[in-house]
Image (cartoon, grey):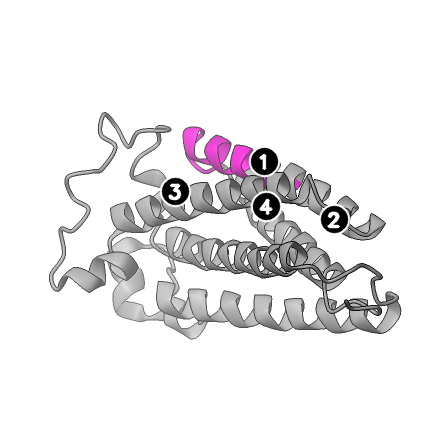
Amino acid sequence: MVKSGLDEELVSKTEIPRVSPYRLAAHLSLAFLLYAGLIWCGLSQFSPRPRYVMTPQMRRLRMFAHTCKGFVGLTAVSGAFVAGLDAGLVYNSFPKMADRWIPSDLFALEPKWKNFFENPTTAQFVHRVLGTTTISSIAILFLLARPLTLPGRANMALNCLLGMSTLQVSLGIATLLYYVPTHLAASHQAGALSLLTIAVWLTNELRKPLVPK
């Protein structure tokens, strides 16, 4: 990844070293996977197995919690393409992109699939959609859990997940509106890691109970 940013041809064109967005996304994905795996193993080792009755409603909640965790990870990976393509600087308005909900240059490149990885407009659009999907899914998860009796730590993790997702979206919007200042961009990236940590914590607290039905 670092080597890709030292390509003489690219540096001579922009005068600024730029790493490959593909390698940046791959590097971030592997780092997050390794981190999430370590957090899961650590929690499983040192945190006592939860005690609750495995009803059909709890089983569905567990599955949806894992889905939310997947959305968190996918949104973070899409953020790597936003960073690698400087996509945070192409449309600095919210909720619309300039005066449109769907920008006209969304599929400007050929073949079409390249837009998702090399078109800054598409990268930002996808990140917006995934971010909105993620916080909406977490809000739905929170509402689905309200009628259920969750273990104490799981309930705490769920509350933290909703709060952190709200903060993360707020950071993302602020980063966009203020033209990606370094301190906000770094905080947004740290927020993604924090959100993933809480999502892993929640799913770990909802793992197979000690006393299943």
* Magenta stretch: helix, strand or loop mostly: helix
**Neighbour tally class for label 3: few under 14, some 14-19, many 20 plus, Cα within 10 Å:** many
The foreground one among 75 and 172 is: 75
Looking at the image, do the residues carrying marks 1 and 3 touch, with CB atoms under 8 Å apart?
Answer: no
- The disc, 1 or 3, on the residue closer to the chain's N-terminal end is 3
In-image side of 133 versus 156 (left or right) = left
Q: Nearer the viewer, mark 2 or mark 4?
A: 4
Q: Earlier in the sequence, mark 3 or mark 2?
A: 3
What's the distance in space between the residues labelled 4 and 3, CA to CA? 20 Å
Q: Nearer the viewer, mark 2 or mark 1?
A: 2
Q: Where does label 3 land, which residue?
A: 128
* Residue 37 placement (x, y as % from top left): 66, 72
Q: Which residues are magenta?
A: 164-180
Identify the disc placed on residue 44: none
Indicate the secondary structure of the residue bearing disc 3: helix
Looking at the rendered image, the quarter that the N terminus falls into is bottom left
Q: Which residue is mark 2?
A: 157
Horizontally, residue 14 falls left or right of residue 132, namely left
First in residue order: circle 1 vs circle 4: 4
**Mark toward the viewer: 3 or 2:** 2
Which residue is label 4 attached to?
Answer: 141
